[in-house]
Each structure stands twice: as structure tokens, then as C-alpha cells.
Amino acid sequence: MAFMDKVKELGRKIVESGTIVEEIKKKAQALNKRIVLCEGEDKRVVEAASICTQEKLAHIVLLGNREEIAKNNPNVDLSYIEIIDPATSPKLEQYAALLYELRKAKGMTEEQAKEQAKDPTFFGALMLKNGDVDGLVSGACHSTANTLRPGLQIIKTAEGVKSVSSFNLMVAPVTGNEYVPDGKLVFADCGLNPTYTAEDLADMAIATAKSAREIAGLDPKVAMLSFSTKGSAKHDNVTLVQEAVRIAKEKAPDLKIDGELQFDAAIVPSVGEFKAPGSEVAGHANVFIFPDLQAANIGYKIAERLGGFQAIGPICQGFAKPLNDLSRGCKASDIVCAVAITALQTR
């Protein structure tokens, strides 16, 4: 099939199936999960809560004072949204006791736990820890640290995972791309950790493959990226990626993963066959693990600005339960998308 025919075919498929985001929303609707939004003081969050409720993407629990929320959002129908004020919740004492048990070894007192549990993000994390909600979304008007700190202290990392990471779902423009037959790729880690050890990179590769399968519906083929392909260069940075590949294969022997690979060797079939003959990943990768945050952040923004890709994320992974951080510049539609993705992460 000629290139332009492939482009037209991809465009037809996207039109027929709806956007990637709409596909994610449909999957979320079928799950009917409880997701807590911690920032009822933010109008974008309240609008998103209303949209999610109307579209039945999830059962939303909005944290904040109902009277204040109603006063600040007179045009939003709150009648079907569950709103909980952490300061007056009947579960505050229970959550404070849970927080104390989790943090007493770090020196937290019972009084400190009672005060900390009133904080909406901590309260939301305690709801998640206690099984009262299935996922958490925050960060619209708070820093990443304010969202991730409760996650790390209360939810903690999943079994066998040492560090939390993030990924971006990269959606190809409708005009298509011959190297992106599914119309989507996954990049990691574009927004969280500046540096990684080999074991961290391996854990991130395994987690990102799982995310690619569950969120994007991909059959993950994971490329561990470098400026070298299969030993073409010698450097400690190359050795780091090679060691990460070894560890990942040991931990997840069924995972389709290869590296170290340069980007062109990972995505262009002819280059992949030339530089890494016999690889089931080289030339066909759809999940890209960058060696550090600097490279990943630059890479996804190049794809977004020059390639016309839509970047969804960063989306957190590696927590024991789904917890996601928003950009403070987010729109209500971004929050809605984050809620849907968080619902899918519960599976």
C-alpha cells in the first residue's frame, strides 16, 4: 500500500472509531469507578466533576465545602455530585488514625495526623488507601509535590516497584504517520524523575508497557532509547541502558523489549533491520523509554510542536493504587481525560 493510501486508511479508522480520548472514555464508562477530585475550590475541577457525572465516566467524589462550591459555581448542577468536606467528614477520625499508623514510625504524632488528615489531598489519599474510592486526581491548583507527597507517604509504590514514574500518550495527527500504524505511541518518563538507575529504568519499562496495554490498547513493543544501538557507542550512559534491558527481561521475560536503540532504529523498519537484525522490537516500537527526564521532555515536545502529535499526560504509574497529578495550567477537558484514564488504571 502506498504511503498516501496508508495515510487515508489511518484517517478513515480514526474517523470511524472516534478519537483516542473518546475510546478511553467509553472504556471508563463501562467500569463505573469512584474517583476523588481533591480541589473543589477550583472552578475547572468543579466543571470537570459535572461533565464526568453527566457523561457517566465515573462516580465523582468532590472534596470541599458544598456551600462554598455552590456559591462559586452558580451555573453548575451539583445535585448529582457527591461532595465531602474533609473538615466535617464523619470519617475524619478514622482517616487520622490510619495516617498515624502509617506515619508514626517517621515521628508523626496523633495530633499532627488529625490536622494533616483535614488537608484535601491527604484526605483523598486516605480515602484511596482505605478503599473508599478507586482513584485520585489532583494538582489543578497545587504543585506536583503537594499531590505526590501524600501518594508516596500513604499509597506508596506497587509491589516490586521502587520508584513512581510517568508517561505521555502521544496521539498522531489525523493526517497519519507511516511509522505509527495504531495512531498512538507512549513516551516515558516525560515529567517526573530527572534521573534513573538501571533498575528504575527497568521498572519504568515494565510499568509503561502495562499502561500502554491498559490505557492505549496497544500490544507493547518497548524500545530502550539511547544515542547508541547495540553497542555502536561506548559510554557509561549506554551501559546504564543495556543493564536496564537485562534487568527488565529478567523481571518480565514475556515482555517485548529491546535496546539500547537509537530512535530511528526503534521506529523505522529498514533502519531497525539494518542496525538490530532479528529484533522483534527494532523498527516496530510503540513504547519508548527515554534514558532520563531531560531527553524525554525534549522528545515529547518536539513530537508535539513539530510533528503535530497530541500529548496526553504526564500520567503517573507505579503507585499501588491509581493517583494522577494535573498541570496547574490544565483545562476542564484535561481533568475529564485524567479522570477517565485514572478509571482505566484501576483494572
Image (cartoon, rainbow, N blue to C red):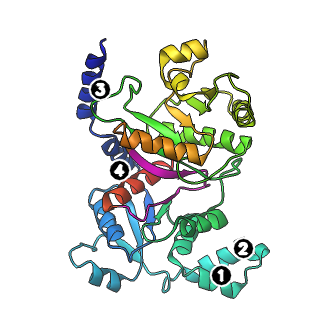
Whether label 3 touches label 2, CB < 8 Å: no
What's the magenta region? 311-330
What whole-number distance in Å separates the C-alpha atoms at marks 1 and 3?
53 Å
> In the figure, is residue 192 to the left or right of 88?
right
Whether label 2 touches label 4, CB < 8 Å: no
Check disc 2: other Cα within 10 Å, few if <14, some if 14-19, many if 20+. some
Q: Nearer the viewer, residue 79 or 330?
A: 330
Residue 345, how many percent across, how many down? 50, 49
Whether label 4 touches label 1, CB < 8 Å: no
Residue 325, how many percent across, how many down? 49, 60
The tag earlier along the polypeptide, 3 or 2, is: 3
The tag earlier along the polypeptide, 2 or 1, is: 2
* Residue at image mark 3: 10
* Residue at image mark 2: 103
Quadrant where the N terminus sits is top left
Check disc 4: other Cα within 10 Å, few if <14, some if 14-19, many if 20+. some
SS of the residue at dot 3?
helix
Q: Which three-letter amino acid code belongs to the residue tagged 2?
A: Arg
Q: Which three-letter amino acid code belongs to the residue tagged 4?
A: Gln
